[in-house]
Image (cartoon, rainbow, N blue to C red):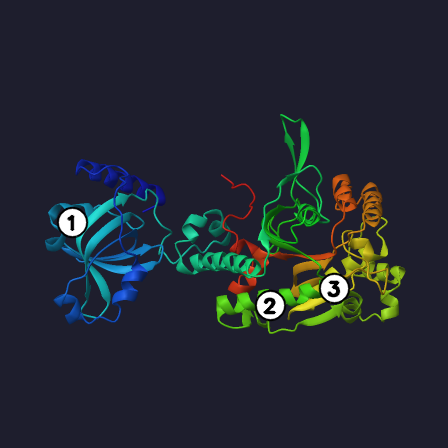
Amino acid sequence: MEEQDQVVARRKKLAELQALGERRFPNGFTPQDTAADILERHGHATAEALDAQPIRVSVAGRLMAVRDFGKAAFVQLQDRSGRVQVYVRRDEVGERDFSVFGLLDLGDIAGIEGRVFRTRTGELSILASRVVYLAKALRPLPEKWHGLQDVELRYRQRYLDLLTPEVQQVFRVRAAVLQGVREFFTARGFLEVETPMMQQVAGGALARPFVTHHNTLDLELYLRIAPELFLKRLLVGGLERVFELNRNFRNEGISTQHNPEFTMLEFYQAYATWQDLLTITEELVSGLARTITGGVRVSYGAHEIDFTPPWRRLAVKDAVADATGLARAEVDDVLRLRQVAETRGIPLPPGAPYGKVLAEVFEKTAEAALIQPTFVIDYPVEISPLARQSDDDPTIVDRFELYVAGRELANGFSELNDPDEQRARFETQLDAKRGGDDEAHAMDEDYVRALEHGMPPAAGEGIGIDRLVMLLTNAPSIRDVILFPQLRPERR
C-alpha cells in the first residue's frame, strides 16, 4: 500500500484498540529488564535449566519484525539496549491480549511480560504471558526496514535513522568521548566551567558571527564563535586550569566538515606553554582512541590512522613548500605566493598580508596531504591575534594546529598576556575589517582591561569534538555525528 493507505489502516487499528478498551496512548507500563540484560544474564543457560527454573522478565520497545503463524508469532522487539526475540502464542497470552497483539503493526511500541526460554533452534527468547499496547506508529517504518537509504532523509528524520543500531552506536561513542574528556581534565585538576553563548563582542576566533538582538536592553548581540576570551578572563581571576565543552556558532559554509553549530573543547592552563599542550593532546586523543576502539590504530576511510605518540611536527612554510614544489625562499616571498594563489584559483581577501596569503595557500594545497597526526607549527603573527610571539622569531607565534586525515582537529598556542601588545593586535585586526575582511577580530576593550590586571603566562587549546568523533567512528561527514545537523528548509 502507499504510505497514506497505511496511515488510514493504522488509524483504523487504533480505533479498534480503543473499542477493546485500550487508551489511545497509555502510560503506566514499567519494564524491569532490557534486551541486552536478558541476553547477557541468561545467554549461557541451557533450555533445560530455563524450563526447570522459570525466569520472569518484562521488557518494552518497538516491534521491528514479525513472523506471523496464525495462532502464534515471533517478534523482534527493540529497546534502548538492542533487540530480543519474543514468542507470542494465543494459548499463553489469552484471547484478549492476542487480539491486542493482532492490531499491532511494525513500528508500534508494546510491553511484554513472560519467561525466558530457548526455541527449537536454540535462540534465547521470551515466551510472552502478557502483551501490553503502549503506542501506535501512525506512519509506517521505511519499506523493507534496514535503515534509511536516502542520506538527506537520514539527517532530516534522525528519529528514524536512530532505529538502526549502527547509527545509535555513533552517538554512544560521542557520549563516551565527552565523558572521557571530562574525566581526563578533572583528573588533572581542571575545573569545568560555562561561559556566555551570547556576547557583545564576537571574539576568540577569526570567523563571521551570527547576529541577534535583545529587545529589553535594545542591544545587538553575537552568538559565540569561541569561548576563548571569557576563559582567559578566568585565568586572570585565579582559576588556573579551566575547560569548557561548548557550542559555537559560525555564519559560514556547510560541508562534510562544517556545520554552523558545532561542539568544541577549549582548555587553558596557567604556567604552561604550547609545547606542554602537544603532550596533553597526544595523551588525550590516543587515550580516547584506546577507550573507544581498543587501540591507537584507527581505520578512517581508505587510511589507517596511527595515534601512537609522538606525532610529527611540521612548519607551515615547509608544508607549503612540500605541497607546491616551491623553495623555502620562494615561500617567504609574498609576491611569489600570490602568483601561486592566482595560478591555482585560490581567492585572497583584498589587501591580504603575507600571513593571510600563506594561510590560504596552505589550506588549499597542503592540508589534504596531512593524513597521519601532524602538528603544524610556526604560524605568522598576522593570522594569530591572540597568540604569544616567539622569543626566537618575532614574525611567528608559539602556536600549532593539529591535522589528521587531511583536516584540522585542534588549534593551540601560548597565550598573549601583554595588554599593550594585545591592543595593538586588535587594532591591526580592525584595520583588516575596515579593509573588507569580515572574519577579522573585533576590539574587546574589557578583555584588554582584564589583561591589565595581570594574566599569568598560560597556554590554551581548542579541539573539534565533532571531527574527533568522525575519526573514531569512521564517519565521512560531520552530519553523521551531529544528531540534528543544519539543513536547507524541506521542500513541500
Count residues near mark 3 (Cα–Cα under 10 Å), then give few for <14, some for 14-19, many for 20+: many
Left or right of 409, for residue 170: left
Separation of residues labelled 2 and 3 (CA atoms): 29 Å
Q: Is residue 440 visible?
A: no
> Percent from the top left, x then y, of residue 208?
70, 44
Q: Which mark is drawn over residue 283?
A: 2
Label 2 with label 3: CB-CB less than 8 Å: no
The residue under label 3 is 365
Amino acid under disc 1 = Phe
Q: Residues within 10 Å of mark 1 (few under 14, many from 20)?
A: many
Between the residue at mark 2 and the residue at mark 1, the CA separation in whole angstroms equals: 57 Å
Locate residue 491, reporting x and y percent: 52, 41
- Quarter-wise, where is residue 423 in the image? top right
Q: Which residue does the image show at 79% across and 68% down from the upper left? A: 324
Circles 2 and 1 in contact, beta carbons < 8 Å: no
- Which residue occupies 45% across, 49% down? 158
Q: Give the label, 2 or 1, closer to the camera.
A: 2
- Residue 46 % position (x, y): 19, 72
The three-letter amino acid code for the residue at tag 3 is Thr
Q: Earlier in the sequence, mark 1 or mark 3?
A: 1
Give the secondary structure at mark 2. Answer: helix
Asked which quadrant contains residue 210, the reply is top right
Nearer the observer, 21 or 200: 200
Q: Mark 1 = which residue?
A: 98
Image position of 243 with respect to 299: above or below: above
**Disc marking residue 274:** none
Q: Is residue 357 left or right of residue 162?
A: right
Alpha carbons under labels 1 and 3: distance apart: 66 Å
